[in-house]
Amino acid sequence: MGGKYKTPMLDELEKGPWPSFVTEIKKAAKRTQMADDELGQVEKSYVTKRGYWKHGGIVGVLGYGGGVIGRYSSLPDEFPGIAHFHTVRLNQPSGFFYTAEALRMIMDIWDKYGSGLTNMHGSTGDLVLLGTTTENLEPLFAEYSSRGWDLGGSGSAMRTPSCCVGQARCEWACIDTMNICNEVTQYYQDQLHRPSFPYKFKIKVAGCACDCVAAIARADLSIIGTWKDNIRIDQAEVKKYADAGMNIQAEIIDMCPTDCMSYDGKTMKINDVQCNRCMHCIAKMTKALKQGKVKGATLLVGSKAPIVVGSLLSWVVVPFIELKAPFDNLKDLADKMIEWWDDNAKPRERIGELIEVKGMRPFLEAIEMPPVPQQVREPRKDPFFFWSESDFN
Amino acid sequence: MSLPERQTDIGPPHYEKFLPPIVKKNYGKWAYHEVLTPGTMVHVAEGGDKLYTVRVGSPRILSTDTIREICDLAEKYCDGYLRFTTRNNVEFLLSDQKKVDPLLAELKAKKYSVGGIGPRISNIVHTQGWVHCHSACTDASGLVKAIMDELHDYFTTKALPNKVRLAVACCVNMCGAVHCSDIAVVAIHRKVPVIDDVNVGKMCEIPTTVASCPTSAIRPNPKTKSITINEEKCMYCGNCFTVCPPIEIHNPEQDGVAIVVGGKVGSLRTNPKFSKLAIPYIPNEPPRWPSTVAAIKNILDVYAANAKKHERVGEWIERVGWEDFFKLTGIPFTFQHIDDFTFMRDTMRNSAAFKY
């Protein structure tokens, strides 16, 4: 198999040092007609500068409303191998850890039922299997689920939660991101597999303000690790950084956003009352500076990409929450957020957009959070504000 | 052929099954880490255990063949343990330092790109493009390949003032953190969609289609049982096409890409930031998008030459000012750069202090 199409345009993308997706499609095309026809259609797109995929249709496995994205070529006569080319989202393990044994099992089943192409991973975090037919979906799901692997989310549903590597391999993780991610994924299985929300709802868990999983930009509920007490300083290690050539004044002290640090060549001092826990000094001097010991998370809500009325970054709603397994306090808060959103949103309205329409107050009241200055950059500027009866008591 | 019995709502396998013994033992007990080379780092536990990580780039689209090859390497050097990063790199996890150099030698022989750690470029987060998406107006994988070939040294060796996070989105839906990246490409439309009235009437819910428009440019047209679009209001976002396919937004000769810069997600030093418009339009130039690649290289070079150590692209631009950004990069400033959508109040200058 393979080689049915001449691909002079795509062949140009096999040149150069970075690994080539064209080479990957060609490898699969040696074994499956699907991948070969995919190669042919993509080459055509490169010539005409347009795609040839129809909108997704409703396909899936019995009892689930998501996890499979229907995909059909708009040129099925020309490229019959990809008349059906559905995407299957397999829910990744927290932190994207695998064993070779598990990956080989996943690949063996995929070679039996699909194109031989994958995405490691999709933007939301799923292990994405690219290209199979409607009739293969049930057997494929039986093979995977019987071996302990389930589908991820799609459509107007809880989407597959994801997280950074956390305490598995990072000294900065203030919370157990992988455990939180796994727990909320298990807790929301029904909402993940059976779309019943106004629109998508994403949860991402980052261990610290470095936010390696882009939680603050890409999650309706962003969970970001932080701490409350003083940064721990190892003065001997500070000296070693200085001895190794670090310009502590320029690189650390002068770059502190709250101007709360000093260094006289011998001793580093931090005025912790002024520290806003941005992570700069700790990230640059990881041997010398450690976060405090009172650790937890900040919860923020609302971020999303530009569709429909502009991008949003998540807003702080809960400045600090302790998160200990099984994280019932987090699940309880998330339930309240989702319930308020589900009761009030129009179809295709994200929670951040709904808060903009309804105001932050009803949302905070729904999740039983008081107003605190940590939630805002600055108070409102206009003299127009609502009073409710409860404010007069 | 009999199939095994399916299970439902079991969720993903528990991650503990996939953790190397050294990670299980030191979970939550890591003391510090050091970047050893652009592609290797060591994490040291409180008790002294050392975990070595070797990072390699990937095109994200991987064949099962390549994944099996990666598994072979993990079995040979890492007792079968590996992970992927949130930016689609592969990480080999080694508890035995003696195996690091032999792994690096084999990766080099097999032409893997080792790097992406520290103040440099990591893999480009990107979307499906023409490979697999109906709403794509460029090909994400091809752009990524062409950009990473050009910037390859910044992945494998060369250092920058700080890390630079790149992203490519093949339409404004932005399935990836394009809106908060240091430098990102987003594909855009520039022409009002063409309405297929007959099929709109047959296939689409008119109220949903009307509601999908962020600028209220769409009105129902009872005569045709379709809709009309006010051309003066349409900003070509394509959301109507998403809910109603017979509203054709694609226009191969007029579609292209915009470049946005200065976003970040971390809170280090300065708050997380959205990316802002640098270049409103570059035509689609498959297979290797030379104008787009050159534009990104130019922005990166100007940043590398002018930013202070540890400044991200957005922090550097905010320090010197956007008027300097356009001057230093030589990028023309156009009407498209002035926000006339949702952020105008936040983005116009209200001060008499500025630079030339």
Image (tube, coloured by chain):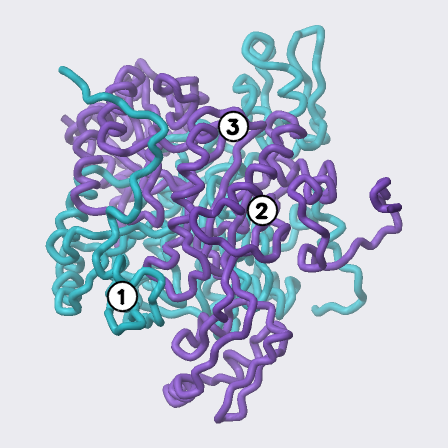
Please name the residue that numbered disc 1 is placed on. B40
Mark 1 vs mark 2: same chain? yes
C-alpha distance separating marks 1 and 2:
37 Å
C-alpha distance separating marks 3 and 2:
32 Å
Please name the residue that numbered disc 3 is placed on. A156
Residue at (29, 44) in percent of width and height: A13
Q: Give me the chain that's purple.
A: A
Could you say whether the residue bearing mark 2 is in a helix, strand or loop? strand
Q: Position of residue B154 (x, y in %)?
A: 36, 63
Mark 1 vs mark 3: same chain? no
Say which label, 1 or 2, has the lower sequence index.
1
**On the picture, is B31 further left or further right than B271?**
left
Whether residue B316 is visible, yes or no, is no
Could you say whether the residue bearing mark 3 is in a helix, strand or loop? loop
Q: Position of residue B211 (x, y in %)?
A: 67, 24
Please name the residue that numbered disc 2 is placed on. B280
C-alpha distance separating marks 1 and 3:
40 Å
Q: Chain of mark 1?
A: B
